[in-house]
Image (cartoon, rainbow, N blue to C red):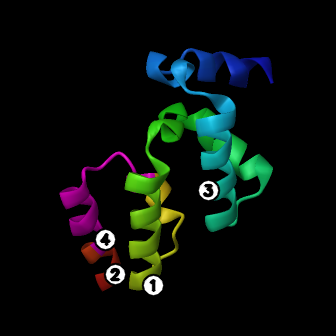
Amino acid sequence: TNKELEKIVAAPPPLLSYSFDDNIKPKLDSLRSELHLTDKELSKIVVAFPPLVGYSLERRYAPRIGACKEAGIDPRWVLKTISLNDAKFHTALARQSDK
């Protein structure tokens, strides 16, 4: 929708410099696949927090999704914690796995 597009365009300026075909699309495709998200679910998530597409797939998402899977935690949890630095993420992951 236009309102959703406005929100994404008003997102942090670095996002506007990313190549859609080389950066954003592969990242969204991977997240959709790895996290078993529908297009609608992924769209809702990105519109709610556009900076999600700014994090590195190889350095941020993939290792954290793998850590969640190893810990038996739903890998979608990564979306709630992606902005944490690595130390805080692993601390939160340890707490989450203790539940």
User: Alpha carbon of mark 4 to alpha carbon of mark 3: how far?
Assistant: 19 Å
Magenta residue span: 80-93
Left or right, 3 with respect to 92, comes to right
Q: Amino acid at mark 4?
A: Leu
Mark found first going from the N terminus, 1 or 4? 1
Callouts 1 and 2 close, C-beta under 8 Å:
yes
Q: Are marks 1 and 3 in contact (CB under 8 Å)?
A: no
Circle 2 Cα neighbour tier, 10 Å, few/some/many (<14 / 14–19 / ≥20): few
Q: Classify mark 4: helix, strand or loop.
A: helix
Q: Which residue in the protein does label 4 denote?
A: 93
Give whichever of discs 1 and 2 has the lower sequence position. Answer: 1
**Quarter of the figure with the C terminus:** bottom left
Residue type for callout 1: Gly
Question: Residue placed at 69% from the left, 35% from the top?
Answer: 21
Q: CA distance from mark 1 to mark 4?
A: 10 Å
Residue holding disc 1: 72
Mark earlier in primary sequence (2, 3): 3
- Closest to the camera, between mark 1 and mark 2, is 1
Name the residue that disc number 2 marks.
Answer: 97
Gap between marks 1 and 2, in whole Å?
7 Å
Mark closer to the observer (4, 3): 3
Q: Is residue 67 above or below residue 13?
A: below
Q: Which residue is mark 3?
A: 31
- Callouts 2 and 4 close, C-beta under 8 Å: yes
Say above or below: 80 vs 5. Answer: below
- Number of the label disc, if any, that sits on residue 91: none
Drawn side of residue 87 relative to residue 38, left or right: left
Look at the numbered discs 2 and 3 and tell me whether their residues touch, using CB distance below 8 Å: no
Task: Give the main secondary structure, helix, strand or loop, of the magenta stretch.
Answer: helix
